[in-house]
Amino acid sequence: MLILLCTFMVLFRCSESEAVTSLDVQNFTDTSFEMYPDFNIDYDNLDVLENGMIAIAGYKNTSSKQILIIVDPNKKDTLFSVINEDPVTIFRPIHLLPTQNGNLIYLSHTPKEAGAFDMDINIVKLNSNGSVIWRSKIAESNENEISNSITQIPNGDFFILGSNSFLDSEYKDFKIYRISNDGELIFSKPIFQNLKLTSANNLKYLPNDNSILILSTDKMESLTKRKLQITKFDLEGNEIASSSIFENIEFELSPDGVKVLKDGSLLILYSIKNDSPSSTNSMGIAKINIDFKVEWEKVYSSANPEFISDLIEIDDNELVVLSGGRQRLTNKEDITLIKLNEDGDILWRRIYGTKSLKRGRGLIQKVSGNFLLISSQEFQIGSTYYMKLFTLETDTYGVPI
C-alpha cells in the first residue's frame, strides 16, 4: 500500500551559511592545472571509475560515432573506444555509470530506424579498459524511449529511469526498467501516471531500506517556478513513499542532484536564483535524514559559487564540494573547492581562478588523502568540436601540489 509522507519541508527557505572571511580563503591561478592533449570529441558526460580512471563520453562530430575515452590521470595514457561503429545520428543525453567490479555502463540513444526521430535506449557494458562485455537495447514500442538516469543494486541488476521525451518544457510519461547484470530486461513499469511532471532523474539506490529513490520536478504556475518531489520505490518498481516540496522560487537541480551519505541520509544539491539585478545563482544544499526529515539546509550566496559540480563525503562526516561561479568582470569562471563540516558550515574555501571557461567536472580523494580536481573546456573550430581536459592535485587542505 502506498504510504504518502506528508509534506516535510520548504526547501528554499534556507539559512544562509556563515559569512566566509578572508582567513578562510586562498586564491590560486590556473597555471597549476595539468593539460591533456586536445580530444576531438563533442563532450557529453564524464565520470570516475573505481580504479581511478576518468571516463569521457561523447561523439565525433564529423562521423556521429559514439566514442568513449578512458584516461589514466597518473600516467596520462588514453584509450579510445568506439561504441557505435555505424555512422548514425546520436542524441543526448549520454549516461555513464561506474559499476561493481570496476566495470562501466554506457547509455545512449539511436533512432529506431533510419531518419526517424523516435529513439531506442542503447546499453553497453565495458570493462575498465573500454572493451565491450555485452550490448543490449530497450525498444519496447514505436514511441520515444529516453534514458534519464541509471543506478545499480547489490545483486548486480540495474534500474533505468526512462521517459518519452527529451524536452523539459512539456509533461512526460515515465517508466522504470530493471535490467539484469547480463543485460536482459527483467521488467518495465509505468510510474507517476497520475502526476504531471516535466522532469524526473537522479535515480539512486538506498541501502538502508533496499529501495530506489527518484527526484522529480514540475513547473509551477510561472514557467520558472518548480515543485520538487522525492519518491521511493521497492525493487519490483512499486511506489512506497512520496513527499512533495513546494516553494515559489526559481531553482535548478545540480547534474547529480542527490547524494546518498554513508549513514543513509541524503544531500539535495541545487542552484537557486538570487534576488539581485545581476540574476546570478547561488549553490544550495539540504540534508535530509532517512525519515525524510530536514537536518539542515544552506544557501551559500556569500561564497560566490553558483553551481555544484561534484561532492564527496570524507572522514568525520565532512564534505568537500567542487563548484564554480562566473567572474563578474571578465565573464570567465572560477573553480572552487569548499570543505564543509557535518552541519554544512564552511571550514575553508580554495579558489582556482581561470583565464578561460574551464569548468569543474569531477572530484576524487586519493588513497593519500589528497584531492584530484578534474575540469574541462569545450570549444568549436569550424564544424569540429574539441575538449581540453585538465587535472589538479591538491593536498588535504586544497593547496595545489
Image (tube, helix red, strand yellow):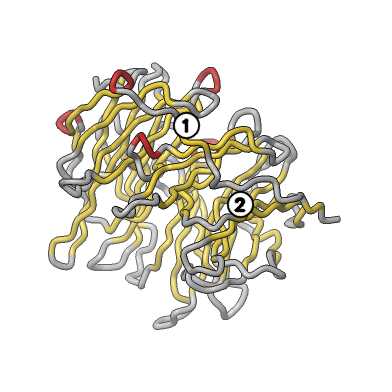
Residue contact at pointers 2 and 1, CB within 8 angstroms: no
Q: Secondary structure at mark 1?
A: strand
- Residue 330 visible in rendering: yes
Residue 15 screen position, x and y as percent? 52, 36
Give the vertical position of 22 relative to 304 (above or below): above
Question: Badge 2: few (under 14), some or many (20 or more) residues near its Cα, within 10 Å?
Answer: some
Residue 73 screen position, x and y as percent? 30, 32
Q: Quadrant of the C terminus?
A: top left
Residue 365 screen position, x and y as percent? 41, 26
Disc 1 residue type (three-letter): Ile
Q: Quadrant of the N terminus?
A: bottom right
Q: Is residue 313 left or right of residue 242?
A: left
- Residue 72 visible in rendering: no
Disc number for residue 182: 2
Which residue corresponds to the image point at 36% horizontal and 39% vertical from the top-left?
323
From the viewer's side, name the closer residue of 277 and 314.
Answer: 277
Give the vertical position of 92 relative to 339 (above or below): below
Label 1 sits on residue: 312
Image quarter of residue 186? bottom right
Disc number for residue 266: none
Which residue corresponds to the image point at 69% horizontal and 64% vertical from the top-left?
191
Q: Is residue 148 left or right of residue 359?
A: right
Residue 113 screen position, x and y as percent? 46, 80
Which residue corresponds to the image point at 29% horizontal and 40% vertical from the top-left?
375
Disc 2 residue type (three-letter): Asp
Number of marks in the rendered image: 2
What's the CA distance linking mark 2 and mark 1? Answer: 30 Å
- Outermost right residue: 1
